[in-house]
Amino acid sequence: MRLISTAVWSFLLSAMIVYVIGSMAGISFNLTAAIAIAIVFTLGTVVLGETVITDKEN
């Protein structure tokens, strides 16, 4: 469930970024760019969450 919610939020945030930047540049919304950014965000978050950030048990 944690990975699914990460993917959904990554897609929503990347779609917002693509929309805002596209609107400022005067171009139309590009769904392919939003999906590509969402994949990068999701992979980065999963890698950081599973490998780099760990709980230290004392």
Image (cartoon, rainbow, N blue to C red):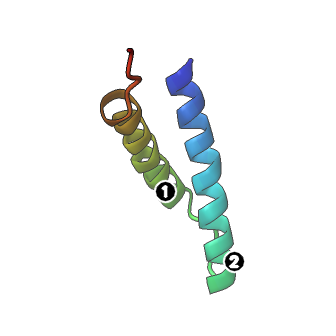
Which is more toward the observer, 52 or 15? 52
Secondary structure at badge 1 equals helix
Q: Position of residue 34 (x, y in %)?
A: 53, 56
Is residue 11 among the parts visible in the rendering? yes
Rendered-image quadrant of the C terminus: top left
Vertical comparison of 29 with 52: above or below: below
> In the picture, residue 48 is in which quadrant?
top left
Seen as rendered, the residue at the extreme left is 51
Q: Which residue is mark 2?
A: 23
Q: Which residue is mark 1?
A: 32
Is residue 26 among the parts visible in the rendering? no
Inspect the image, locate mark 1, and give the three-letter code of the amino acid beneath it: Thr
Within-10-Å neighbours for mark 2: few <14, some 14–19, many 20+: few
**Residue located at (68% from left, 71% from top):** 20
Vertical comparison of 30 with 42: above or below: below
Spatial CA distance of label 1 from label 2 is: 16 Å
Which is more toward the observer, 50 or 35? 50
> In the picture, residue 50 is in which quadrant?
top left
Within-10-Å neighbours for mark 1: few <14, some 14–19, many 20+: few
**Residue located at (32% from left, 36% from top):** 52
Vertical comparison of 41 with 56: above or below: below
Secondary structure at badge 2 equals helix
Instruction: Point out the tag, 1 or 2, that comes first from the N-terminus.
Output: 2
**Residue located at (38% from left, 34% from top):** 53
Query: On the rendered structure, is 37 left or right of 54?
Result: right
Q: Position of residue 36 (x, y in %)?
A: 43, 53
Q: Position of residue 49 (x, y in %)?
A: 41, 32
Inspect the image, locate mark 2, and give the three-letter code of the amino acid beneath it: Ser
**Residue located at (48% from left, 60% from top):** 33
Q: Position of residue 3 (x, y in %)?
A: 50, 25
